[in-house]
Amino acid sequence: MKTAWLCCPAYPLRDRDHLERAVSSAEEFCKRIGHRLVVAPGMQRFGGPGMWLAPELRRSDIAAGLAHDLIIPGRGGYASVDLVDVVLAHPGVPPPIIGYSDVTVLHACWRTKGGTGAYGWMPGVDDCGPAALASGVAAILGEAGVIDDTSGGEVMLGGQATGWLFPACLSVLAGLVGTPAMPSMDGAILALEDIGEAPHRIDRYLWQLSAGGAFNGVKGLVFGKLPWNNPPREKEHQGDFARDRALVWSARLKVPAVFGAHFGHVKEPIALPCGRQAQLQADGRGWRLNWAART
């Protein structure tokens, strides 16, 4: 029977109750895809907000996970950058991986190694309930799928694009520019989301990706909702918002683009496959991103 490795590449879970709930969710996921769950030793180590575990422990766990058939990060947060050299040194193609947020680091490494996965459901994230789990199952099983304007969003620049789909957390991906972990985005439909980032930081991340060549050959852009809760000191904010920055960059890149797709840091996120061929259609009637079944 195939095995799935539940591990902690970034922030740890909070306590034993959090672990039990994550394991229960992961077991349900594995039941639906026909895998047996194996829990990494690092999952037994807990921590409070903003804490990440020692790199040695997480590096050991991810190295062990590469021998399994699927890797399931418990949650995101920060610190997956500590694992880049371990993954890139792996002699073969890594197994599929599912997760979002800081797991963007690993999805990027996977892409450079020829691996695949899904950007979505994680068992230790409170916002990932039954709908997110079902969506993640479908993505890992290789089913065809779609995300469109029925979940919200709007067209920034109309057109049609075909390419391979790469979803990512904007700030995390921008931080990989110039490193061995950054894959080429030539031919990609790039789906970018984040949470809690002010408009000037969103613009800076997009500028960094552009200046670093990451947008070279990109065929289309799908922005997430990019929610930002105005800090009290900025309640009188009179500048741009995330939507405005997305509109500016869509025009600069001159590719079909939409804003407000329901994936990533939202309640019950839709899982997007990584590396699968997809088509983006956007016009005055709305938008639609669909991907083919895995062949």
Image (cartoon, helix red, strand yellow):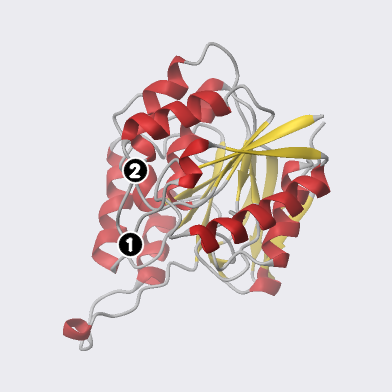
Return the x and y of residue 257 as percentages of the image width and height.
53, 57
Name the kind of residue labelled 1 in the image.
Answer: Pro
In front: 90, or 247? 90
Label 1 sits on residue: 49
In the displayed structure, does residue 54 sit left or right of residue 183? left
Q: Nearer the viewer, residue 234 or 251?
A: 234
Q: What amino acid type is highlighted by mark number 2?
A: Leu
Residue occupying the point 42% across, 35% down: 216
The N terminus is located in which quarter? Answer: top right
The residue carrying pointer 1 sits among few (fewer than 14), some (14 to 19) or many (20 or more) residues within 10 Å by Cα, namely: few
Q: Secondary structure at mark 2?
A: loop
- Indicate whether 179 appears above or below 170: above
Check whether the beta carbons of the residues at disc 2 and disc 1 lie within 8 A of each other.
no
Measure the C-alpha gap from mark 2 to mark 1: 12 Å
In the rendered image, is residue 243 in sight?
yes
Q: Secondary structure at mark 1?
A: loop
Crowding at dot 2, Cα within 10 Å, few <14 / some 14-19 / many 20+, comes out as some
Among all residues in the image, which is located at the extreme bottom?
Answer: 236
Q: Please identify the quadrant where the C terminus is shown.
A: top right
Question: In screen coordinates, is 127 left or right of 42?
Answer: right
Is any atom of residue 181 visible in this view? no
Left or right, 205 with reference to 189: left
- For disc 2, the marked residue is 53
